[in-house]
Amino acid sequence: MNVQTSGFEPAPIPDLGNAPIPAKAYYDPEWFELERQAIFLRTWFPAGHVCELPEPGSFIRREFEFARASLLISRGKDGEIRAFHNVCTHRGTQLTDETEGKRNTFSCRYHMWTFGNDGNLLSAPDFEKFGLEKKDCALPRVACEVHGGLIFINFDKAPKQSLVEFLGPLAEGMSHLPCAHATNFSEYVYEIDANWKLTYDNFQENYHLRFIHPNTGKATFSAANPFGYPAAQELHDPHRTQTIWTNPDSASQMTATQMLGFGMGAKALLRGDVPENPFNRAYFAVFPSFFMLGSTGNNFSHTVYPIGPEKSRGVIRIYWINDDQTPGTRYAREFTLAVTRDVHSEDVAVIQAGQRGLASGALEHIYFQEQEVLCRHLYMMVAKAVEEYKVEQGLT
């Protein structure tokens, strides 16, 4: 991908036409159900990071409303990371309410069926009376693979592609990001009354920056690029990338607090422990709703989890290498998350206002201009997946 970082010489924008987009795709329950079946239940989806499972016995619990599932993701004695449904195979009781922890076994509180962190059934009271084999009572597995430090899951019982095959041309770049070496992260979680695509699209285009972020977005504005448009936008079906452009003179526009926050810890954020990163200004958008910025000093990821046709949850993370080693490092990391949250807070109201407007049914279509090509591409990839699913299921 294009990793241009200086000046503003934008690459040609991919031409996907200018056809209007059906507004119903952003609020209709029937369309959302098709997306759920065609995409979210059969696509690799981020679930965490390896630093959350530092040693054998470590586990995290993740809730996926779109799959109506609770998952346990654990590191076994052999070091392998596995994912299971958080459901006892006796009568379905969820095994734990803990969000994270360390344990070698999971016991159901109802009848004390006990499972190892490899998912196998270890013991059950009076098990001989069931007429079953323990090997047939293991926790239901969910496909789970790791790339670039990120843990992905797939609810398809037989995924058609491995994770690396799915990531395609993005896989190589993602393996070079600081996230691949991270040992901890800062996190901000939010819920929003908006469709997952409408929410995600806000972070795929810079058309709104001058109106919604006139002050916090100053680093992207200059006389050469007054609207803060990206230097390049590329399509890698079903994914996409762009090269973020930053004003080389942005330091002169910073407030004293910004100078302190970014200047004090800029070189200390990762303490020089990250390998050279040729994708420092790259934006990796992984279908359907995950993206990551490759910046060494702000390795930022954002996942939008669909909850319903008009409700979503976002998880924003900034990945770090090593613990805070100086007060300056701690300050810079906290400041970076605070700035990220402040910028995001400027978006929430307008995204929700858009959802209310679309859900009113007043519009049959919405429109994207050429600088919103990544938004158009996402819709096209969603529509393609839905149409293929409908053909496969005989729904057309």
Image (cartoon, rainbow, N blue to C red):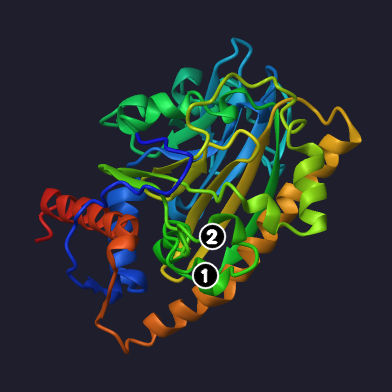
Kind of residue indicated by mark 2 = Phe
Residue 59 locus on image (x, y percent): 66, 30
Q: Nearer the viewer, residue 125 or 301?
A: 301
**CA gap, disc 2 to disc 1?**
8 Å
Residue 125 appears in the picture as rendered: no
**As drawn, is 189 to the left or to the right of 282?**
right
Q: Indicate the secondary structure of the residue bearing disc 1.
A: helix
The residue indicated by pointer 1 is 210
Percent across and percent down for residue 158 are: 30, 30
Tell me the residue that label 2 is attached to: 221
Marks 2/1 in contact by CB < 8 Å: the verdict is yes
Nearer the camera: disc 2 or disc 1: 2
Q: Which mark is residue 142?
A: none
115 w.r.t. 358: above or below: above
Give the crowd class for mark 2: few <14, some 14-19, many >=20 residues within 10 Å.
Answer: many
Q: Residues within 10 Å of mark 1 (few under 14, many from 20)?
A: some
Q: Position of residue 326 (x, y in %)?
A: 88, 31
